[in-house]
Amino acid sequence: MIIAQITDMHVMAAGQMAFGRIDVNANLAAALARLAAHDPRPDIVLVTGDMTFDGEVDEYTALAGIMAGCDIPFHVMPGNHDNRARIRAAFPGHDYLPRGGFLHYTIDAHPLRIIALDTLNPESVDGQLCARRLDWLAARLAEAPDRPTLIAMHHPPIDIGIGWLASDRFEGRDAARDIIARHGQVVGVICGHVHRCVQAQWANTVVHTGAPTAYQFPLDLKPHAERGWVAEPPAYSLHYWRAESGLVSHTGYADGFGAAQEFIE
């Protein structure tokens, strides 16, 4: 099974540029085109949040228009730049989305089970898994202990070494760790939010944060690194799962680097 992941698209209203310079809408369209060109193609696309720049209606209109060009089944979940009601309105045919409350759900139609979590806190940029969401996660893991499971959510529960992106403000992070660590079927946790591709061990599994399609945050590990962005190529993740070998994660880029070349002796 091949799972594509796109994240942190930060789509703007049609004709707008992020920071007046970055065509984030074109970046998303380019990433989707690259995914469509893969052979074999992904079975599913997971969209791990921050789909829009500010959660505005016209941004969701633009997002829905771009995503309409994706003919691979895709599933969305919210990030801190998103709005639950507007997500539902933008994707009315996505019946997996709960009609009210948190936008968490399971995908059970594939060999690898997927649990999508809603870590949005409308009052903060930081992640939140409240008691209700933690109870929901524990129940979902308990009901299928023998099924290999991938968890997807926006906010990563790890620190990545970039100080201003510290995860210690993620409410419920430690409780989620304890729940997940008790369930050996979890093969990985995929996230977004930090605008870099990072892997780390956590809760007896591996966390992968996907590189964004929109723009990247600088790889600056100084203790007091300043906030900022860099125009590295828009990217996506491909997660390749087989029962006999587990989960393997790759990063691909929307920018073309030319066709594969033969080695010259």
Image (spheres, grey):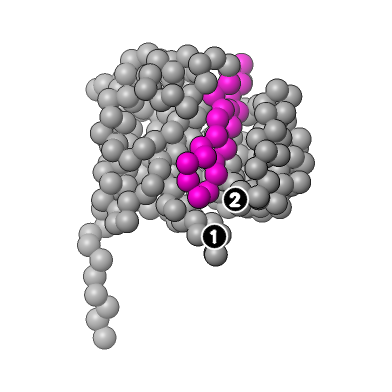
Q: Which mark is residue 103?
A: none
Circle 1/circle 2 CB separation < 8 Å: yes
Q: Observer-nearest residue: 212 or 207?
A: 207
Q: Observer-nearest residue: 227 or 153?
A: 153
Q: Earlier in the sequence, mark 1 or mark 2?
A: 2
Q: Could you tell me which secondary element the residue under label 2 belongs to? A: loop
**Tag count in the figure?**
2
Q: Amino acid at mark 2?
A: Pro
Q: Is residue 229 visible?
A: no
Q: Observer-nearest residue: 172 or 147?
A: 147
Q: Residues within 10 Å of mark 1 (few under 14, many from 20)?
A: few
For the C terminus, which image quadrant?
Answer: bottom left
Q: Amino acid at mark 1?
A: Ala
Q: Residue at x 44, y 24 (%)?
A: 95
Badge 2 is on which residue? 148
Q: Observer-nearest residue: 207 or 36?
A: 36
Task: Name the spot of residue 147 as percent of width and height, x first.
Answer: 61, 48
Q: Left of 104 or right of it: where is 157?
A: right
Q: Residue at x 44, y 20 (%)?
A: 87
Badge 1 is on which residue? 243
Q: Could you tell me which secondary element the residue under label 1 belongs to? A: loop
Residue 13 lies, with reference to residue 9, above or below; the image says above
Q: Residue at x 65, y 50 (%)?
A: 146
Is residue 116 covered in magenta? yes
Task: Name the spot of residue 220 as percent of width and height, x first.
Answer: 55, 47
Q: Is residue 119 visible?
A: yes
Task: Name the spot of residue 35 as percent of width and height, x first.
Answer: 32, 47
Is residue 263 covered in magenta? no
Magenta stretch, residue numbers: 102-123
Q: CA distance from mark 1 to mark 2?
A: 8 Å
Task: Name the spot of residue 183 as percent of width and height, x first.
Answer: 72, 47
Q: Main secondary structure of the magenta part?
A: loop
